[in-house]
Each structure stands twice: as C-alpha cells, then as structure tokens.
Amino acid sequence: MSIIALDGVVALLGRFPALAGVDLDVGAGEIVLLQGPNGAGKSTLLRVCAGLQRIESGRALVLEHDVVSDRAAVRRSVGLLGHDTALYDDLSVEENLRFWARASRVDVDAVDGALDRLGVADRLRDVPVRHLSAGQRRRTALAAVVVRRPRLWLLDEPHAGLDQQGRDLIDGLVRQAATAGATVLLASHELDRTMGLASRHVTVAGGTITEDRTI
Amino acid sequence: MWRDVVLVAGKDLRIEWRSRVTFSQVVPFAGLVLVLFGFALDANRPVLERATSGLFWITIMFVTTLAVQRSTSIETTDGARRALLLAGVEPVAVFAGKAAAVAVQLLAVELVLVGGIVVLYGAEIDSFLLVVATCLVATVGIAAAGTLLGALVAGVRARETVLPILLLPVLAPVLIGATRAFDDALGSVAVDGWAWIGMLAGFGLINLVLGALSYGVLLEET
Amino acid sequence: MTTPASSEVPVHTGSTTTRLLGIAVLVGLVALILLGFFGAPKDDEQADAVRLIFVHVPSAFLTYAAFSVTAVGSVMWLWKRSVWWDLVAHGSAEIGVVFCSLTLFTGSVWGRPTWNTYWDWGDVRLVTTLILLLLMVGYLAVRSMGGDDSAVATRSAIVALIAAVNLPIVNRSVEWWFDRTLHQKSSLTDGNLEDLTLFTLLLGVVVWSLFYVWVMIHRFRVGWLERELRFGDLDLALAQRRAEAHTINDGGDR
C-alpha cells in the first residue's frame, strides 16, 4: 500500500505555481529525504501531503485518502513540523502540549514521555514558550508531533537551529518511527546529516521532481 | 464539539490570564477614554449625564477592536491556525470558543466601566437587572461579529486598520440598542430598555449563525 | 517577460451592445436634463429643489439594486466558486458605492432647503444608507488588500453577506431609535405628483439602470482581462517554473 501517491500534482501559491506537476509514490516505513534549493517547492509538497494545500490539478492520496475531498482523515493521521512551531507564546511548554494533545484527541499522559524523548528538561516545562531558545522551541514543537503518534511524519528542516545532541535525538526518533511502521518525509538542506538517515533521496527543483534515488 | 469550545475558550482565557493584556492595558485604556470624554465635554455634569450611556458603549466599541485584534493575533503569530485544522478541531468550535473568550474579557471590562461611569460621571443605576441584561446580550453579539471579522482580516495586509472599518458599521445597531437600554437603566431618558434587549438578542443570534457558517470557510482558505 | 500570446483576447472592452447602450444612455441623459430642468413643473412647497429627486430617487434605487447584485454574486461565489459571479459582485459594489455617494449627496443638498438641514439623524433611510456606504467601503478595502485570488473572493463575499444580513437590523434599530422619519413617505404612490414629474422620475430610473448595465459590462470585461493577464496563462507559468529546475542545476548550489 502506498502511503503517499501523488499524480501530476500542480499547486498554486497565489498565482505562482509552487508545484508544477509532481509524481511521487512512497511506501510504508520509508524515510524519504526531500532535497533542493530554497523555493523549489519542498514545503508546499509537505503541505499537500498534510491536506493543507488546495491543489489545482492532479491527484494526491495520503494513506489512501484524497487530500482534498477527504482532508479531515488525512490531517488526523499526519504530524507536521513546519517553519512555524504553532506554540502559544504565553503558555508554558506543558500547557501547550496538553492543549494540542486534547485538541488532537490523543492521550494527554503521553506528553511527559514525549518531552523526555525530546530532551526538554524538567525545569523548562513550566516556563512560557516565549522564554525558550529557538532550539528548545523546535524540540517542543517536535514533541507535539510525537504525542500525536502520526502514521506519516512530515518534517520541514527538522535540524534547523538544533545543537548536536538535538540532531542526534531527532535522527533517533525518525529511525524509531520508521521501524515502528511509520513513514517519514523530511525536507532538509543538511545533506551530510540526512543522507545517512534516509533510505531514499528525492531532489525537488522548479516545482518538479528531478531525481529520485533509492539507496 | 462542546468539549472543543471549552478547550479553545479555556486556552484563550488562560493566555489572557498569563499575559494580562486586557487587564494591564485595555482596562486602563478604557478608563482613559472615559476621562478624556470628561475633558472633551468640559466636565459639564448635565451633558455628561445625558451622554453617559453612549460614551460607555463607544468605549466598549474601541475596546472590542483591541480585544479582537489580540484574539486573532494569538492564532496567527506562530501558525496555530493551521495546527488547529491539522488537529481536527471543528471550525465552529474554534469560533464559539474564541467568541466566548472575547465575551468574557469584554464583560470584565464592562464591569470596571460601570464603576467608572458611577464614579466619574455620577451615573445612578435605576435598574441593575437591566444593566446586567444589556451587557450580557449586547456582548454576545459584539463578540460574535468581532470574532468573525477578526478571522476575516487575519490574512490581510494592514489588518489593524481594516478591522475597525468593517467592524464598527456592523456594530452600529448594538451601539444604538445598548445605549437606549442603558438610558432606561440609568433613568436618563424615558424609553423601554427591555424592548431594545430583544433587538440586541436578534443581532447576537444572527451574527452567531453567520460566524458558525462562515468561520470554517475562512480558516480553510485564508 | 513575454506577453501571453492569445489572439482571441480583445484589446478593448467595447462591443456593439455596449456602444448601443452608451448611445442610449447619452440620449436618455439629454432627455432627462431637458425634462428635469424645463419640462417638469415646480413643486408647490419645494419649488425648484424638487428637481433633485430626478437624480436622487434613481440613484437610491440603483444603490440598493447594485448591492443586491453584489450579495447574490457573493453567495454564488461561495456556493459555486464561480469566478464570473465574483467579478460581477466586485464590479457591482464599485458602481454601487458611486450611486450610494450620489444618493447621500443629492439627499443632503435637497434636505437643506426642504428640511432646513443637510443631515437629519432621525431619518431612517438616510442613516441606513450611510451605514451601507461605510460597509461597502469596507468591502472594497478588503478587496484591495490583495492576496490569493480565491482567498480575496471568499473574504469579500463573506463581508458582503455580513453587510447584507446586518443591514435590515441597522434599518430596524434606526427606525426604533427615533420612531419617526422625516422622509417623504413615498412620493411615487401618494398621487400628488404631476404626470410629467412622474414620467421624468421613471425616465431617470431607466437611464440610470441602462448606465449601470453599460458600466457593469465594461467593468466586468476589464476584470476578466486583468485576470487573464495575471492568471490565464497557467501553462506558460508552469513551463517557466519547470525551466527553473534546469537553470538551477546548471548554476550549481543555488
């Protein structure tokens, strides 16, 4: 079964064709690296897979649900870490995660475990997110993805702003998720780092896929 | 659904409680407006007494634009709007929850302002029940229309200026109705305040329905 | 940038229909001016000021007609996602704002000699029409703020609906507020109008309606061409976008 099946997907941002015809097929348990220059369409591609982007033409299935007509089902089963961290500045780390866990209807008790796995120290958990460093913020946002236990992980520049230890943690998480049967799509510039992690390298440029190599 | 309404409203109120924007900035602003009206009308008691109801609700209109802007920016600053969609929260629940939180904040400001007009303008309250009823019913409509228009301008350039242009004309009936009802409650003009409550309730209901129907479209598309 | 080479796209917005309409409007205007100033008799009470109704009443009629069209167009956009209706809603709102301003202007100029005031707060229709003008100015503000085409259409359609739904409440609340109105109850039905005055008034409504249709057709075509220019050539934009892939590969890292 394909986890992601894109067929000739064209997506517009305003009047700009961010995706100009993308075909992609990803199976269960794969870790796929999306690489390519800024503005190539990687983030838009991730948003399409999350059911958050209207598509102009073509067809996109995620977990066999259509991303437009059945977007509620798509959204339920994916976890997205975007450029935004979707955290409320004035709430503490723990309050944020509890809110998102309740909103997503998942087990609120999973919050502590997720924060442990992301290495967010106990002393930070009652601190308003406003006072976190960029790296700590990113870890918290990733913990919110972990809490959802998604079947498809969509990570946009997951290593950005993180220290060495943070990066190792993320790599570990991604491997674990894939071993447990989840699929991971990650967009990254840091090729040295992610080359080894991913089982497949997809190059995106000019809103199309120009290269697709399985390692 | 109701669970999500409470979740969203609770979240917004908790954020307000933590940041205290309403209490540390909006309430003083409202008080300041009352004082400035006092200066502008030359501290003329009879004029002030006659105008008290209107000044009260004008001040609430100003406060509303601030509260709505704040309520909107909570979701837009760090992409939480998108995350709410991803989490699968019903847009209707987001609308109702955010409107409820705005309403609670406005009611708190109104409570303080009622004290303000008693102290500063020498208002005498004939009917407490009518004051409370007016505040409750008018605020539901204000919060509903405000939350809807707040979401509408969320993705727009220069939203700080566009919001009042859209919101204030829509709120004109509330300004008229709530002012008349207050006139009755303060005994400054002989009108039937309770009849106006009916009009305010109609406004509230209609704008709640409008918001419930269109909030989802706005969240998805903008 | 190359211009989209589509030979069917006309370079102007005129056609036989619009030219005929334009001529009809011109002829009608001349007739209206002649009849309004010289044909129709003075009013017993209002003297020459009465002649303003030949502009005021048709403008008011067209104001509400134009905004009704905007409301219908907005519903149709939200329902069918039809760009055609979105353009109609936009054009009609722009023309409506002009008519609405004209209504308020002629109304207050007429009010000065007749009611002895430019503006009367107790007049329901006057206040309602002013609020309508403010709402529609807000509508056009949202339209002009830019962004994704369909997002703009959706946002402004919802503004139009909010305005349309709330306007009766505004009207009701102003009515209760003063519980009286200065306005002429209805000049058309009270039977006091001279035949020629009535005829001139109806001619005014017809000429204004033709003018509305005429401008509307042009405005719609301009809107359509604008869209074509920005949007129409998706194939070209896609080709350019795909071509980026090669230039970037050749150019190395960026």
Image (cartoon, rainbow, N blue to C red):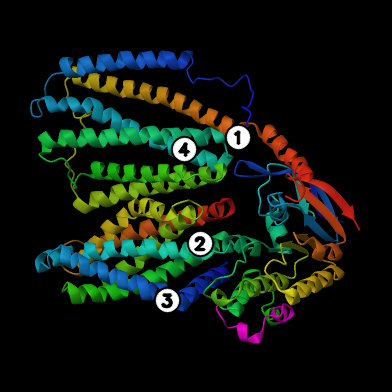
Frontmost residue, A146 versus B138? A146
Tell me how many marks there are.
4
Percent coordinates x, y for residue C159 in the rendering: 44, 47
Disc 1 marks which residue? C231
Q: Mark 4 — residue?
A: C72
Choose top left, top right, bottom left or bottom right for residue B205.
Answer: bottom left
Label 4: element kind: helix
Same chain letter for marks 4 and 2:
no
Say if mark 2 contacts mark 3, CB within 8 Å: no
Q: Are marks 1 and 2 in contact (CB under 8 Å)?
A: no
Q: Quadrant of the C terminus of chain A?
A: bottom right
Q: Is residue C121 above or below residue B95?
A: above
Q: Distance between the residues labelled 4 and 2?
A: 25 Å
Q: Check residue A120 for magenta coloring.
A: yes
Q: Do callouts 3 and 1 point to residues on the same chain? A: no
Q: How far apart are marks 3 and 4 (CA)?
A: 43 Å
Q: How crowded is mark 2: few (under 14 residues within 10 Å), some or many (20 or more)?
A: many
Residue B95 numbered mark, or none:
2
C39 shown above or below B61: above
